[in-house]
Amino acid sequence: MAFDNTHLRQRGIELLKPCMRRLTGFLANQDASLREEAATSLGRIGDPEAVKPLIEALKREKQDEQMPLALAEIGETTAIIPLLEAFGQADRETRPNIATALGSFPDPRTTATLVQGLADPDPNVRFACISSLGRIKDPASISPLLGSLSEANEWIFLAVVDALARIGDHRASSPITAFYLKEPNERKRASLITALGFLRDLTTITVLTRALRDPDDRVKANAIESILRLRLPRDKALGLLQPFIKHPDNRVRGNAMIGIAELKGPDLMPVLESMSEDPDKWVRATLGYVLSVIAHPKALSMILDLLKDGDGDVRKNAARALSGRARDEHTDLLLSLLKDPTPFVRQQAVSTLGRIRSRPSVPILSRLFGLERNFRIRSAVVTALGVIGDTAAMPLIEIALRDKDSRVRANAVEAVEQIMGEACSPHVKPLLGDPDNRTRANAAKAMFRIGDVAVTSRLEVMLRDGDGATRLSAIYAVGQIGLALREIERSPIPTPLKTSLDAIAPIPKNVESTAISSPDTSDNAPKTAIAQELPTGRETLREIFLEHAKEGRYKQAIDTVNIFLQRFPHDLKGVFFSANLHFQLSRFEEAVILYKQAIELDPFHVQALGNLGIACYRLGRSQEAVHYFQQALKIQPDLSTLRFNLANLLLKENHLEEAIHHYEEGKRFGKPPARVLANLGFAYQKTGQYEKAILEYEASVEADPRDPGTFYNWGLILFRQGHKDEATQVLQKALQKVPTGSAGIKSIRDLLERIRGESGKPLTES
């Protein structure tokens, strides 16, 4: 079933409306924490209706950072005019806040207003205007910003330099160079040199070379980074950096070594060895940082040596370095670090075991939880077990859900959701009444994500509670649900939440026969007549086709969006909406054309690429589908469901090794459903990796024991390996678990008969 994710999110927002009204009321509360948390949650939900109350609150509250941040997250362009008016009317204490909000809305009118603000007598207003211009990155602001380099206030000066660096216009190169040459302040000189690197103007190489001889080491270190950003010819860059690989300052030396490694210069081994033997612990600690960044064949072995260092700070950096390089084969080493006397090293080892999804570490981590007294490490253990996703950790997670430490309980809620998926409800639901705010919020979010949308009513009750802590936890939870609603737009894959939202307003089966709400409802009504009756405003017209779709009037929605796109052919949201609408109606040819138009407008539109891949697959164009899935994953590699889709398609096309790669990569970012685990097991089976196949089949059966094919393949491997008793046990378990009447039951019975015939043992069934 295809889901229209945009409209599902809108349905979710409608569910949250009662809660949002409460949040809007909190924007005027005397309690600053309630105001700030309410603004944050409204931003996460992203409903344009929150723009007006947020702007009103912005004009009332002084120096409240959450209001502009919330407006930025909503990103509604209709906020520009009210914000510009508010900026002109506001007093000096609220003007910086509004200037910060304007930085989230790139528009020539915004730039012009912020440029005017550069002359404001209040330094806080000037600082906010400068920072916002840097975020907007409009080249039209270069000249006014250059004029602000004369600011006496050091922090405003640094903000100007940062803004110029962000914009990246070469017109700033000469003025920045001139200021560097006459500037006595070391911090200012260092920032100017950093800015030259971001400008990437080759004409600045002379001043950057001079900066390498600056008396201040911060300037030297920044100059090395800037030279690397210029992408000079390799020999030229190496010649500039090599003299600094033995510099006494750690940061200068570290930057030089990283640069030389990046440029594939001379072997750094002699310098690395001398650093590892240096009596100064900070030199050895710097070596740990360098080894975490550079690609050196002996980096891992040197990291292992540093982990034996007697100083805790050195081991900390070594542990950080190992966390980025560790793989399955380093499990034993990571387990040995769980006994390190430095808490940070133990915590890093725990987190890394989670990242590599080390199943063998589950029992050891569970024991560590019972022995460890450091709450950060205990919390990290629970998080790691959730990421690993092995049901063997559930006894420990159930204990953690009742732990006296609220931070552990909150992490345990997330872990049980990761391990059990939809089946987590009995464990999580009782925690909706937990005394800890974050635990309750995590529980509410988990229940909503698994499709229990009724939890929003409970949150509304909590928002009316007289206790401030209860209201805060409910506000936070509503914001988290807002983020969950945003997440459903990222992938076209069905989820329990999508199913629940879809059930709120079922789609009519005969969408084509729904009458058009106009004087002439026949298919022969001229489109021009319909167009003449529709309003001309972009947003008003958008609201009409969205409302048609929301109410299930899909023919009217298509007619209206077609008229909309005739008037506004480059409106990305309109094109993407039309593509999704055709996709939902199984008009895949039209959907493909529209998704491609969306990608032309935004080449990094992940949802369009993913949906385009599915549409191509539905049309039997497998190679195109693979291409678009791969393009989407290049932009956002952590889309596990999309990666699993790609892997399934590659498996179907018999590209087994590539399919295995994507299955395993997808498991790094998300818990795979039972069907995916079974497919991965089949891929391993087809490539002769039988032990790995069995592990995946076991995991698949644990997640969902109803698929006869998984049991059959698992039993077949064991039978062919000569493990007849084990194969019999697996197949008999299948007869207990698989629903009666399933298509694969006969194959399971046939295999059991064959095993019985060869072993002479009677077949027993239950």
Image (tube, grey):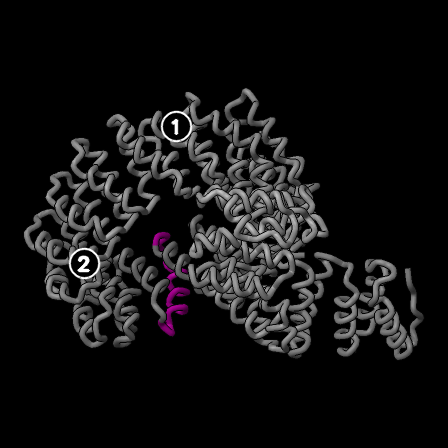
Residue 196: mark in rendering: 2
Can see residue 598? Answer: yes
Q: Could you tell me how far apart the alpha carbons at marks 2 and 1 are, in whole angstroms?
A: 39 Å
Asked if residue 298 lies in the magenta stretch, the reply is yes
> From which residue to which does the magenta span run?
296-313
Residue at figure coordinates x 44%, y 45% from the top left:
538
Asked if residue 468 lies in the magenta stretch, the reply is no
Residue 60 vs 182, above or below: the answer is: above
615 left or right of 266 in image: right
Q: Which of the two marks, 2 or 1, is nearer to us in this view?
A: 1
Residue at figure coordinates x 87%, y 59% from the top left:
740
Disc 1: CA contacts within 10 A as few (<14), some (14-19) or many (>=20): many
Residue 733: mark in rendering: none
Query: Amino acid under label 1?
Result: Ala
Closer to us: 164 or 441: 164
Task: Please give the residue where the numbered disc 1 appears in the rendered image.
Answer: 57
Relative image position of residue 96 (x, y in whole percent): 27, 33
